[in-house]
Amino acid sequence: MSTEAGPSGPTPEQAAPQPPVVTATQPGQVPRATAPPATGEAVVNCIDLTLSFGTRAVLSDLQIPFAGGRVTAILGPTGSGKSTLLRTLNRLNDKVSGYGHQGDVLLDGSSIWGAHVELMALRRKVGMLFQRPNPFPMSIMDNVVAGVKAHKMAKGGELKEIAERRLREVGLWDAVSGRLKDSPFRLSGGQQQLLCLARTLAVDPDVLLLDEPTSSLDPMATESIEALVRTLVPDLTVIIVTHNLAQARRVSDSTVFLNKGRLVEHGDTQQIFEDPVQEETARYVTGRFG
Ligand SMILES: Nc1ncnc2c1ncn2[C@@H]1O[C@H](COP(=O)(O)OP(=O)(O)OP(=O)(O)O)[C@@H](O)[C@H]1O
Ligand SMILES: [Mg+2]
């Protein structure tokens, strides 16, 4: 889906990079064998990243290469900084009072805070879907193409085509094709979330950030979003925050576990769930946390 991926799309290496297995090392603890870090293939790369509010660091010294063309789940107890990290990746926190960062986040190798980076362009490349659907107060059709218009990516009749294609992609077309001019606020919560996803996808992002996107949805709507997420890779790089362990297992290739202000473990999802290196991770993924 990236306009910069070239006509031939991602190489096999980009499409199926080996996930990193990065583990926290504590005094006296010998880490098990780890796979080579996936830095080369990382589309989003957190380097020595510390995030704080006021004098309090929420997350410290994160090294997280998010491999391109894969789904990475971020897990962690409430308050562990998952949303803060996700919102940092498209600079949504920049203007939040007290927020500060040290270290860097690289997107395709360049700092997201670089002097030349335009916020609008960054947010087109790195789209985000929130826990609660947030349709704009405009028609369903206008919602889908709002970003496309803002970025002047298409006009006139093309807009209708884009709206239909994106609404079909998220499975909403049949439900809304007869009422494209209606308000989105009469749609169900799940339909509103799918509409917001259509709007986010319409600007052709390279990276999709999902912050608990199904936590207010029923199992059917949840299943549609999960199924859709799997169809987005390897064209997109997806990072999903979830409290739903079964969902992380179903939908992600790699998993990051955050706790107490740090990265505890990052690895292949199957390894994290079936053979975690850290006892802390084992307790969390088996529901024995606390
Ligand atoms: N705007 C803010 N000002 C001050 N502190 C904040 C702000 N936003 C978040 N925090 C604090 O940062 C920490 C991490 O919050 P964050 O929302 O990132 O956690 P989370 O892992 O997403 O939690 P949850 O699972 O409940 O959504 C919390 O202690 C929170 O109180
Ligand atoms: Mg959160």
Image: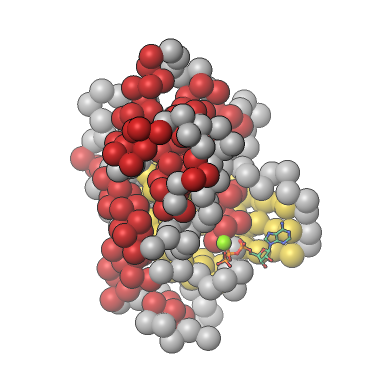
Which quarter shows the N terminus?
A: top left
Q: Where residue 58 appears, x then y in whole percent?
A: 65, 64
- Residue 231, quarter of picture: top left
In the picture shown, does residue 244 fall above or below 64?
below
Q: Where residue 24 appears, x then y in whole percent?
A: 48, 70
Along the line of sight, the residue nearer the viewer: 217 or 260:
217
In the picture shown, does residue 142 fall above or below 102?
above
In-image side of 130 versus 97 (left or right): left
Q: Where residue 198 appears, x then y in whole percent?
A: 40, 38
Which residue is drawn at the image coordinates 21% and 40% (left, top)? 12
Of the four image quadrants, the one with ligand 1 is: bottom right
Which residue is drawn at the image coordinates 33% and 49% (left, top)? 229
From where the camera sits, is residue 247 visible?
yes
- Residue 277, quarter of picture: bottom left
Which residue is drawn at the image coordinates 36% and 25% (left, top)? 162
In the picture shown, does residue 194 fall above or below 257?
above
- Residue 92, quarter of picture: top right
In-image side of 191 versus 94 (left or right): left
